[in-house]
Image: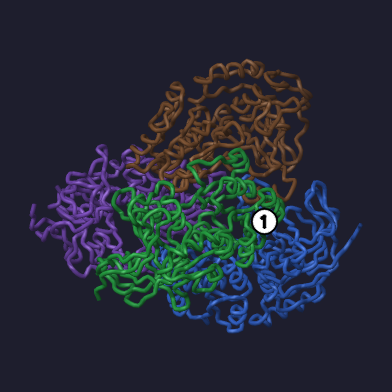
Chain colours: A brown, B purple, C green, D blue
């Protein structure tokens, strides 16, 4: 099989996203698999690159294929790949350490490979992403989906990974009361994973009532529309006055981070996922000290895909309710417009690549 | 209120259990609550004392009131008790450290109070239990039940505690495959708590088909009737060949412990709840070493009651299906006969004290 | 024995510290010991109350005896105390939960008793401290000193406790490179405890050269005079470019906290001991997220005294080099003047009470 | 540089160890380094293969080069290796996962690569070892030694790794009292690493007085000659009656394992390094349950070499006192005879390969 070109949604500049004919990858190298991409979710970071051309220090300087929430079908495997074969349906973990130096070796071997400074990551400049027909990818970062898991939800193991990782590092334990700030896609997957991890109560806050409605539908036990004091009081009312066992900040605002600190019980952990605009944040440090509130930022995730497959296969988590809208690969530019115009109601848009 | 005597189910010797008129406790001391007992479950250890007069080094030398799975209603509180008042419905944690020496202080302060060598425990010689109308108990070991939790299931927070504690120390994490050996009451509460803690698959083994049927009803995903090889193969088939992430031995037989070791994946933990007959056990130590299987025995539990209340109140766990039979306090001797004669089908008998 | 009055160093207002004749405590209650105080260290918090009349929300409204770093001799024990007897030399843990409500019960039972909201603490308003001849104290918060540990260093188990606790929660593990910001008494005890916990390299920064000299004398491997960039470069140079495994902020300045964040390797923990002035701090949150730097504030400590006794008795830690100056109880007001006037060179002043 | 053959100490059968001329490895592949071996320690497992031709299920079926405790000098690097260059002195980690299937991927990515079922390991059949002049080895398993660390002690990072790993997983924390059973080379490195990890007291037992003498010389605080009751009493006497915080079994006898269980305090961990003869062991399971003694077997180690380098470079650990005897490569057969004949006094023999 020799495929020379393929379609890809390429970001050429701010608000300049085009579906181009681009060269297809060649035969997979040793330990790689060639994957025909079937489904790709649109992530807030894809949209952010489209709107701003950068995220923090990551700047799009050359045309870049977007997309990193993806699943597909193996079409060919390179030398040394024994656990996959053509026809296998797989979820693809988008971040792979390049292992080019001792710092990267150090983190890879400790199981903290998301901290490798030389990590490759789909659609993070200068690395191309997955809104295209084919990728070659290290086979050990491709996870076979069982028959009862669709490619569409398989693609969403990637965003669910932030929730799996947040729940693990917090950690959320059986019976916990969990506060989540921000009911966008990341906040909502955290509702699902917090409950899967044993949370007895999940309180979520946002300023947009439509999002809170979705939060209730996917299992939040309580919603709070935007007020930090109400969030704190709700958490205390549910815990004999103590406060939340775990808080997860997904809104990307310092005020939400401080709302988490206030809602947390003494000794609790605030997991920080949402990246605030700017390099610094002013936080209520005194309250953190006298009540020993721990701050645990997370950057992407590690070792979440096997868990994600297990949660979907066993039926413990159903991601289908998060899918608000579907598009074709040729419609990706319009899809981005749609997502931005419907932020309040469009949780997750998924592109059917083919 | 001055109550001089009360009814109590007193063990006088092997197979000699009588409902006697005994002195009621007087006014509660400082930091104590006087509780009218309403519901008490019959535990395997109660039955074991009745059949054998001892459990290991704990020997019944004087008549002893049995029963330690209990809930009741506060009738009076001693000086210094501010968090309870008459009329409160409470689950009672039966083990309370006496704090008589530095070893006991050491474990109490570290939160491992179940390891205090001087712990008081209901119905463990020489301490009386709760098959009676009134007990005085340290108020901080009495946990208020919310309106939506019945006294009957509140009494069963005690046996559920073994499952909560096993899940916590293992620990069971989201997506795990868990093996449980022994489908008696302890094995079955562990099915419920393993699922509440996030297990994606729970495999349980026993030799009695009726018990396995109950296990399926309360949520086990797979059952194995007694064969260690089949248990191991089932665990591997569900985990891409790795084996179970956590195994929990509840059968009290060395063969079940070795079946757990075999079913465990490399690096897994085998939690040991079931106490084998005799002081020693012959275990497959070589397999434990080359695959780094950890053995984590547990003795009772600590800090489980708040979690138990939260799990019941939130509806994450329903203990009602475990209740097979109900008796009155006057029927306790017959209840013990019934439990022994119906081991295969009677999961949990509960006594309605009044 | 009936002693009616005693001497005590009482803070009457800002810069108004007097040695008064005050009533002595009566006979010890049940579970208490009556201790003749022998040695008390002067802590920065004592000095802060003397200079400002408050620390954050803790305001001195009534005359209050200062002092909380203390050791003494048992003179009498109350009912139920079996592990102490008259003549025993003890270090005294100054914080004791009052256990007046369910929140306090919750933290006490989990071993996190420093988080009990109703904790009693020497010399924290409104609780009196230990610059006096006698205190009655719960016997399980009095720790017997072996013969080879002097009362003087026994008194300093209290400040060493912040280091023991910081090392434990970080955690510092064998071979770690540790950064400490601030070379006051707390920073210096952290040098000692970091090394006792296995640190291979300890880098400490301060603006005062005299303090850095002491740091070298007690075992720091590298010192940096005040520059955040140099601190970061030093940490990286010692770790193949990674950065420090653990950072411990003891200076109480947001700039020092940000210096810790910069010096930390990806995935490291910054332990926060120093309380910055004001309620908030502006921190480099983006750098914390993309490198997953965890922030772990600590408030006092728990379960450190047995460890402190073991470290001193075994000779692993020697606190003697930290003692710069000694005073008598009658000289306490002058001692406070001395400490303030000699901040650069006076690490720890100890009062010989008698 | 083209070297066709080299010298190697090859095990041809039981008691048949010969220094042969064998083919030298060719040019290093991508990501490999070609190392000239300089120093190799003789391990008990090497001797065991020589005496028995097997260790458990690992059977020597073809002639095999022995030796896995090694350090050497880089002579050439393959494509993609940037952190090493010719002339670098390196310690070599002998176990490298082959990553041939999903189980191996699973453990590698979690940082538990010693559990990969397809791991390559020097001198474990069918993999050749390092008693030879040259090996090609994955460059990320070669750790550069700083100037102040000799190749000779660099070679011993391998046996020290069992101690580093045991201390980490136990974990040993500052101030702990540690019991070690067996004062052979593994027991003795555990004395060193337990102290480096913060142990305040290290008690070691053996039946051979000469070994106990060495134990005292390298830092054990107490020695016990062989009696389990005395070991238990010694541990309790040093811990206010509690027992040891951590026990490490290095003797390879079930009786030593039971001695560890008896000496452990409630809640302690017994780390199991010594592999008993036979597949099973009879252990005091009842005592383990009622006192919650955890059993933590270890199989080799992971992520220990960076720590080992740091401990040696900083001077926290000195391995030199463990080296009892030195040999040349041509003398390896005699060296094995010597080691067996001088078990009581020869701790570690090191071969100077060239």
Q: Quadrant of residue A71?
A: top right
The residue identified by callout 1 is: C224
- The residue under the point 46% across, 72% down is C152
Horizontal and vertical percent position of residue B184? 33, 51
Is residue D341 positioned above or below C236 on the image? below
* Displayed quadrant of residue B194: top left
Location of residue C308 with respect to A292 vertically, above or below: below
Is C161 placed left or right of B55 in the picture? right
Q: Position of residue C141 (x, y in %)?
A: 36, 64
Labels in figure, total: 1
Counting other residues with Cα less than 10 Å from the Cα at mark 1, is it few (<14), some (14-19), or many (20 or more)? some
Which residue sits furthest bottom? D209
In this view, the residue in front, A244 or B44, is A244
Q: Is residue A85 above or below residue A269?
A: above
Rendering coords of residue C246 (x, y %) = 59, 53
Q: Is residue A23 left or right of residue B60?
A: right
Comparing D132 with A197, the one in front is A197
- Image point (25%, 66%), residue name: C30
Please tell me which residue lies in front, B206 or C23. C23
Residue B287 visible somewhere in the drawing: no
Name the element at disc 1: strand
Q: Name the foreground residue: D259 vs D84.
A: D84
The answer to whether any part of residue A163 appears in the image is: yes
Where residue C285 appears, x then y in whole percent? 58, 39
Specify the subunit that label 1 lies on: C
Q: Residue at x 66, y 82 (%)?
A: D345
């Amino acid at each position: 099989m020799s495929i020379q070109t393929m379609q890809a949604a390429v970001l050429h500049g701010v608000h300049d996203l085009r579906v181009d004919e681009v060269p297809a990858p060649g035969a997979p190298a040793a330990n790689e698999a060639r994957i025909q991409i079937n489904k790709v979710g649109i992530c807030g970071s894809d949209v952010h690159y489209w709107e701003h051309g950068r995220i923090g220090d990551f700047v799009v300087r050359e045309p870049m294929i977007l997309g990193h929430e993806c699943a597909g079908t193996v079409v060919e495997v390179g030398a040394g790949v024994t656990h996959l074969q053509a026809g296998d349906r797989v979820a693809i973990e988008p971040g792979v350490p390049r292992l080019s130096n001792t710092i990267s070796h150090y983190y890879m071997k400790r199981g903290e490979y998301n901290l490798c400074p030389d990590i490759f990551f789909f659609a993070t400049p200068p690395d191309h992403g997955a809104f295209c027909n084919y990728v070659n990818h290290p086979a050990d970062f491709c996870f076979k989906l069982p028959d009862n898991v669709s490619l569409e939800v398989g693609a969403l193991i990637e965003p669910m990974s932030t929730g799996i990782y947040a729940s693990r590092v917090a950690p959320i334990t059986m019976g916990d009361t969990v506060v989540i700030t921000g009911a966008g896609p990341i906040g909502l997957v955290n509702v699902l994973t917090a409950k899967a991890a044993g949370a007895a109560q999940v309180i979520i806050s946002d300023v947009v009532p439509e999002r809170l409605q979705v939060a209730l539908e996917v299992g939040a036990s309580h919603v709070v529309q935007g007020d930090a004091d109400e969030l704190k009081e709700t958490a205390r009312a549910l815990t004999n006055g103590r406060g939340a066992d775990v808080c997860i900040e997904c809104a990307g605002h310092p005020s939400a981070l401080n709302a988490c600190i206030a809602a947390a019980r003494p000794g609790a952990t605030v997991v920080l996922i949402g990246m605030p605009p700017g390099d610094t944040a002013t936080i209520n440090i005194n309250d953190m000290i006298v009540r020993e509130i721990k701050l645990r930022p997370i950057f992407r995730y590690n070792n979440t895909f096997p868990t994600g497959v297990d949660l979907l296969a066993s039926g413990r988590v159903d991601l289908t309710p998060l899918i608000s809208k579907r598009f074709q690969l040729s419609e990706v530019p319009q899809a981005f417009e749609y997502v931005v115009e419907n932020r309040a109601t469009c949780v997750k848009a998924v592109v059917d690549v083919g």
